[in-house]
Amino acid sequence: ERLTEDLIVEILSHVPAKSLYRFKCVSNHWLSLIHHPDHSKKLPQTLAGFFYTGTDVERLPKSALHFANVSGRSCPAIDTSFAFLLSHRQVDLLDCCGGLLLCRWHSVGGDECPYIVCNPAREEWVMLPEPSQAEARKVSIVRLGFDPAVSSHFYVFVLMDYVRRVSYTIAAVDVYSSETRRWVRKERGLNESIGHLGGQYQSTVFLKGCLHFIAYGSRPSPICVAAVDTEGKTSTTFCIPSYVPNGILQQSQGCLHYSSFQSEDGLVLRLVVNVVKDYETKDWMLKHTTKTKYLSGGIHFNGYRVIGVHPECDLIFFTAGRATEVMCYNMNSREVKVTSKLEDGGPPYLPYVPLYAELQSLLM
């Protein structure tokens, strides 16, 4: 009680986000300090919600960006119009990582659509130089890699396919570094035959300096997890357990997770969560499983989909049926609750954790 509020906030600013989340229960005083908007820039942040895109043919423009708040009253309003980006006609959100967003910027009265990386929490952004064009190549997947706990620099990965092949074999990888402000390209040979699954909508994870994505490779494990480093080289590939098309690859508590709803005889019966706790061995372990009837109060739904895993704790976010709500499942207490309503739209759902730190790489 003898500590001043400023000193308490200073101490709390040095604890992990998971600990800060638990410290809300210490007292009403600490709860009010943590939720106070004047302290948000100092304190570590946790998952605020998910960005997703909706489409309406009767609206101009047809697509619109939405945000599903899953954190409650502690989350400040998110401006999905990106009004701080001047002179833009439309912004296409491609990826979200570490509090930064990767977008395609459509200018007013122009045809150019350069890549930009922005921080909506600080309303800062930077436009990237265009990567050099490659003949017989087409852009397939564009992703952002950023870990503010490791470095203040971000990376943009562009995975390219062969144009004239009915295949998703990766032909080349372009990587942009905010440190060098340059693109580097790594051409791939036939002996490095790695393909991707799901295109731009598939889930990816930036972990340990590599972009991880679900891919197909050589036998005996044709479906695998591939990791591309910041030089565009494939650093590793390893198997994935029980692959299903609606499964997602995400990071939680510093570990790689693969979560999916498993079906049998056409019925979705079970939620399965696997984790790689030891990245050196790349061994998957079953972390949690439960029947879907316990998630929906015994009511059967079609179309269960995992949309995210909380980065700091054992929470799974999913939709069911017509996907009008985001539901949260606590793997420890096995409780389910509705956290947000959804407008028109669908996957991908991109998890967003606000970043209030200043980055020199985003200063024009």
Image (tube, helix red, strand yellow):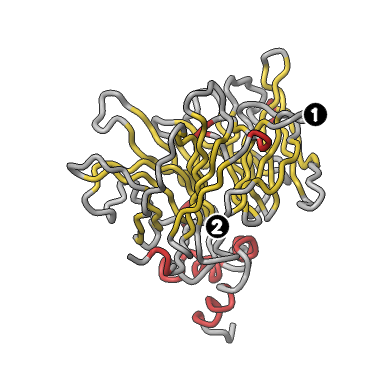
Whole-percent x and y of residue 178?
46, 61
Whole-percent x and y of residue 235?
68, 49
Tell me the mark number nearer the camera, choosing from 1 and 2: 1
Classify residue 308 by image quadrant: top right
181 sits to left or right of 230:
left
In this rendering, the answer to whether 10 lies above or below 70 is below
Q: Residue at x 24, y 47 (%)?
A: 88
Query: Which quadrant does the N terminus fall into?
Result: bottom right
In this rendering, the answer to whether 198 lies above or below 363 is above
108 sits to left or right of 35:
left
Q: Which residue is mark 1?
A: 220
Q: Residue at x 57, y 38 (%)?
A: 203
Depth check: 38 or 232 in front? 232
Callout 2, which amino acid? Answer: Thr
Callout 1, which amino acid? Answer: Pro
Query: Which quadrant does the C terminus fall into?
Result: bottom left
Depth check: 249 or 230 in front? 230
Q: Dot 1: within a 10 Å radius of its alpha carbon, few (fewer than 14), some, or many (20 or more) residues? A: few
Q: Residue furthest top?
A: 265
Q: Dot 2: within a 10 Å radius of its alpha carbon, few (fewer than 14), some, or many (20 or more) residues? A: many
Classify residue 139 by image quadrant: top left
Q: Residue 46 bears which disc, if any?
A: 2
| Residue 265 can be seen in this image | yes
Q: Residue at x 21, y 42 (%)?
A: 110
Q: Residue at x 76, y 52 (%)?
A: 279
In this rendering, the answer to whether 236 lies above or below 244 is below
In this rendering, the answer to whether 355 lies above or below 134 is below
